[in-house]
Image (spheres, rainbow, N blue to C red):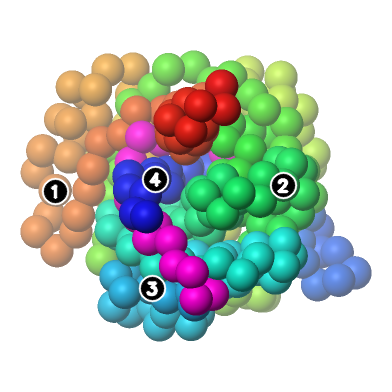
Amino acid sequence: MISADWPAPAKLNLFLHVLGRRPDGYHELQTAYQLIDFADDLTFGLREDGEIRRPEGPPSVPAETDLAVRAARQLQAAANNRRGVDIRIRKRIPIQGGLGGGSSDAATTLVALNELWGIRLPVGQLAGIGRELGADVALFIHGHSAWGEGIGERLTPIELPPRHYAVVFPGIGVSTAEVFQASELTRNSPSLTIRGFLQAGGRNDCAPVATGRYPEVAAALAWLARSGDARLTGTGSCVFAGFAERAEAEAALSDLPDEWSGFVARGLDRSPLQERLAAERARQGQI
């Protein structure tokens, strides 16, 4: 059996405050996650021999370290499942771009295989498996734009104003670990409330580190700032600006430098993964 067209959407961090360093070495964060309608696409071919393989995926990421493969193996072990899968990933989200592509691929794998393998763990338990793979995975499993706290894993669903985003990838990846380990990263931002953010916004504390260490990120941020309020997402490398109308976002990218790539995406409150899951359940006559 082959089950196709499972989306793995990207996210933007509309702000990212680093409140302090935790005793476990991680950082206490606050952020607003905005899901967008730009996604990788995954296909799952079920196997009866227990093998988990990735015959198609990003060449720069070995299959054994791919978060989607690791997610499938985590779920297989947690449920003592004997079935396997071939995972094919059609990659669109830039790697190490701050858009959550790897985490989203892992979340889509967990949600899809939880259904296709007939395991049907509750969402909370599935998100717990996801958190072992990365802090952002739970966001994509829950499937709603959210206010994030802790290391990003404590989520409160939020409704955000309709926006279209111009997103620029400056052709390089940024190491999240390098940014969070940087001595120049500030770690003392005050705590915000959701109302405070919606009224006054916030900043990305990782931006000075990323732009200081990666000139390409600094150049992309300065270039996009000519057209709007340009910001870094996550630890980078992608930058974005929000607009009320799609035509405005498209105009912002009209003279994009050849060495960069970019796209326009619409902000979403609810993930298309949830719609795909509902369609799969309807197909199987569960709802």
Residue 23 drawn at (x, y percent): 90, 69
40 inside magenta stretch:
yes
How far apart marks 3 and 1 lie (CA) works out to 34 Å
Residue pointed to by mark 1 = 256
- Name the mark nearer the viewer: 2 or 4: 2
Q: Few, some or many C-alpha atoms within 10 Å of disc 4 (few <14, some 14-19, many ≥20)?
A: many
Q: Is residue 146 left or right of residue 6?
A: right
Residue pointed to by mark 3 = 54
Kindly identify the amino acid type of the residue bearing the numbered disc 3.
Answer: Arg
How far apart marks 1 and 2 lie (CA) works out to 45 Å
Residue at horizontal 40%, vertical 82%?
62
| In the image, farthest residue toward the right | 23
Q: Few, some or many C-alpha atoms within 10 Å of disc 1 (few <14, some 14-19, many ≥20)?
A: some
Q: Do the CB atoms of the residues marked 3 and 4 lie less than 8 Å apart?
A: no
Residue 155 drawn at (x, y percent): 72, 38
Q: Which residues are magenta?
A: 33-50
